[in-house]
């Protein structure tokens, strides 16, 4: 630890390490960048240093939601356990499974894995979980967001119940609390800061710009600030590629990182960024959790995150280990609701900032954009673009011609008048004629429809019938099906067997008679 430069433990390390050494379950909640990895890695290595593992039977398991996090924990394990002689294996997707199988055959003390690859090897019979004594579930809230909780529940079910479980998360939502109650037994809860808080070492800022000015604003911010290296977060993978090409076109030293990239390309890009070969890294939220990049000076949110919790994790990549960091967010007027959600979660307003040369966005424009967004796409304050209620009303009027309500009212009132009138006499032709003429009087203003008999016809009825008969004759004789005629094979007569005449009682049997005839012959 002295060679690694550690002198004083962080608050989460100071509280968690003694509890882990006691063998108790731990429920740790601390903001990102406070040293959660060392808080469970260091005591684990101290516990496991006394014995060795068997083949295909790891002694401890660390579950991580992403490959980058698993790789980072493995690097920390190598650095911390330099003189302990403990072995580890890294099970992540996108890597050779044969090498991972060989590492498991030799026996590992610490198994660092993502849920998918771990279950794959377990189903193939390449790994046994009967000897796991310590289970670590890291970044549990991220696993919940990525849909890994069913896999985690299955992994927990195949691990011996007599174990020590360490559960760490940056936020403590109700779902995370429920999972902790299911996985842990009488845990020691450690909370060193309020959930979803921003580290005090990070200087934040919010810049409202128009959508067309976002790239220009980002370029000016990068040039204005003293940016040594920076992460630039986008909400969508396709936006990562677009922004990467734009920055590269303008001469910036930039790389791209998102989940659709090949694993080798992801590792190469991340290593180049850590080695300061790349100054800027445009990425998706795959890099928002747990990545520890030493000396990261800036974080830019090119898009306001859809989930407010992701804002805390994004800007937590800077200002780590007591260093100062800067985190700036670009927002359009339509992002007003997302900004409010972030400020509500962090319980602090993000300071507004301006960039010279770009038009400032007023609070009125932000409020107007929020109203337009609620009213539907294309809605405008003057009402000409409101496509919600006006289109629905227009559709109703178009279908009914604007007169549908009146006949409904008349029809609904007619039975009431009939109930008030005395009983009518028997139905005859006169009332029928009156009833038939009433609708005509109501619709006198409408154009009178032509009677069916008054319509012009091409030919007389007899000529039309003759024409139809000629058409049928041209088609030939009608086709007869199975149900029209009886098949010929069903009309073949079946011969009946002839009945033999009954012989008299005193007549000899047929065999005896045939024998006598033979003797006579």
Image (cartoon, rainbow, N blue to C red):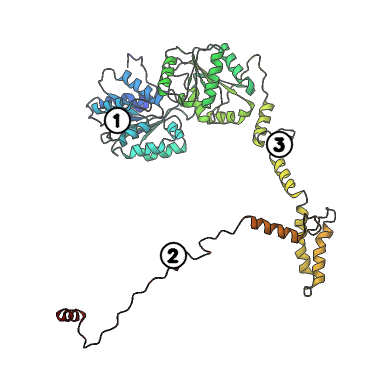
Q: Of 260 and 234, which appears nearest the observer?
A: 260
* Pointer 3 residue: 386
Q: CA distance from mark 3 to mark 1?
A: 60 Å
Q: Which mark is residue 60?
A: 1
Q: CA distance from mark 3 to mark 2?
A: 75 Å
Q: Quadrant of residue 321?
A: top left
Q: Which mark is residue 22?
A: none
Q: Of 349 and 465, which appears nearest the observer?
A: 465
Q: Position of residue 272 (x, y in %)?
A: 43, 15
At label 3, counting other C-alpha atoms closer than 10 Å, the crowd grade (few under 14, some 14-19, many 20 or more) is some
At label 1, counting other C-alpha atoms closer than 10 Å, the crowd grade (few under 14, some 14-19, many 20 or more) is many
* Pointer 2 residue: 489
| Residue shown at the point (58%, 28%) measured from the top left | 339
Q: Residue furthest bottom?
A: 506
SS at mark 3 in the image: loop
| Residue shown at the point (68%, 59%) measured from the top left | 469
Say whether disc 3 or disc 1 marks the residue closer to the N-terminus. Answer: 1
The mark total stands at 3
Q: Nearer the viewer, mark 3 or mark 2?
A: 2
Say whether disc 2 or disc 1 marks the residue closer to the N-terminus. Answer: 1
């Amino acid at each position: 630890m002295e060679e690694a430069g550690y002198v004083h433990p962080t608050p989460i390390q100071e509280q968690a390490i003694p509890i882990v050494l006691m063998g108790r379950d731990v429920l740790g909640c601390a903001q990102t960048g406070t040293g959660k990895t060392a808080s469970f890695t260091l005591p684990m290595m101290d516990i496991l240093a006394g014995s060795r593992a068997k083949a295909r039977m790891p002694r401890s398991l660390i579950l991580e939601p992403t490959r980058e996090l698993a790789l980072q924990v493995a690097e920390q394990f190598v650095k911390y356990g330099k003189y302990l002689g403990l072995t580890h294996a890294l099970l992540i997707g996108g890597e050779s499974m044969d090498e991972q199988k060989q590492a498991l055959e030799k026996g590992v003390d610490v198994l660092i894995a993502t849920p998918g690859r771990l279950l794959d090897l377990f189903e193939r019979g390449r790994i046994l979980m009967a000897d796991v004594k310590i289970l670590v579930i890291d970044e549990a809230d991220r696993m919940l967001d990525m849909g890994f909780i069913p896999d985690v529940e299955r992994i927990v079910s195949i691990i011996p119940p007599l174990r020590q479980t360490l559960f760490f998360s940056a936020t403590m939502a109700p779902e995370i609390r429920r999972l902790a109650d299911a996985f842990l037994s009488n845990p020691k809860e450690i909370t060193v800061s309020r959930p979803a808080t921003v580290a005090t070492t990070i200087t934040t800022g919010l810049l409202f710009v128009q959508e067309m000015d976002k790239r220009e604003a980002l370029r000016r911010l990068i040039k204005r600030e003293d940016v040594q290296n920076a992460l630039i977060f986008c909400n969508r993978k396709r936006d990562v590629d677009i922004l990467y090409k734009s920055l590269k076109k303008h001469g910036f030293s930039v790389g791209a990182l998102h989940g659709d990239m090949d694993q080798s390309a992801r590792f190469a890009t991340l290593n180049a960024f850590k080695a300061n070969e790349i100054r800027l890294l445009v990425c998706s939220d795959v890099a928002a959790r747990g990545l520890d990049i030493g000396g990261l000076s800036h974080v830019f949110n090119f898009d306001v995150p859809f989930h407010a919790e992701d804002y805390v994790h994004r800007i937590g990549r800077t200002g780590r280990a007591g260093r100062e960091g800067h985190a700036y967010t670009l927002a359009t007027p339509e992002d007003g609701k997302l900004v409010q959600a972030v400020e509500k979660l962090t319980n602090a307003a993000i300071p507004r900032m301006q960039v010279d040369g770009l038009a400032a966005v007023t609070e009125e424009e932000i409020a107007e954009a929020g109203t337009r967004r609620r009213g539907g796409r294309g809605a405008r304050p003057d009402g000409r673009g409101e496509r919600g209620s006006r289109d629905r009303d227009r559709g109703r009027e178009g279908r009914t011609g604007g007169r549908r309500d009146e006949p409904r009212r008349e029809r609904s009132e007619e039975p009431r008048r009939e109930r008030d009138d005395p009983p009518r006499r028997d139905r005859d032709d006169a009332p029928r004629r009156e009833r038939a003429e009433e609708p005509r009087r109501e619709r006198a203003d409408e154009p009178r429809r032509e009677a069916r008999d008054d319509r012009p016809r091409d030919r007389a009825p007899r000529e039309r019938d003759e024409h139809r008969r000629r058409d049928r004759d041209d088609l030939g004789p009608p086709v007869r099906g199975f149900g029209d005629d009886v098949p010929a094979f069903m009309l073949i007569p079946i011969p009946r067997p002839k009945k033999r005449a009954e012989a008299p009682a005193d007549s000899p049997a047929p065999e005896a008679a045939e024998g006598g005839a033979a003797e006579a012959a």
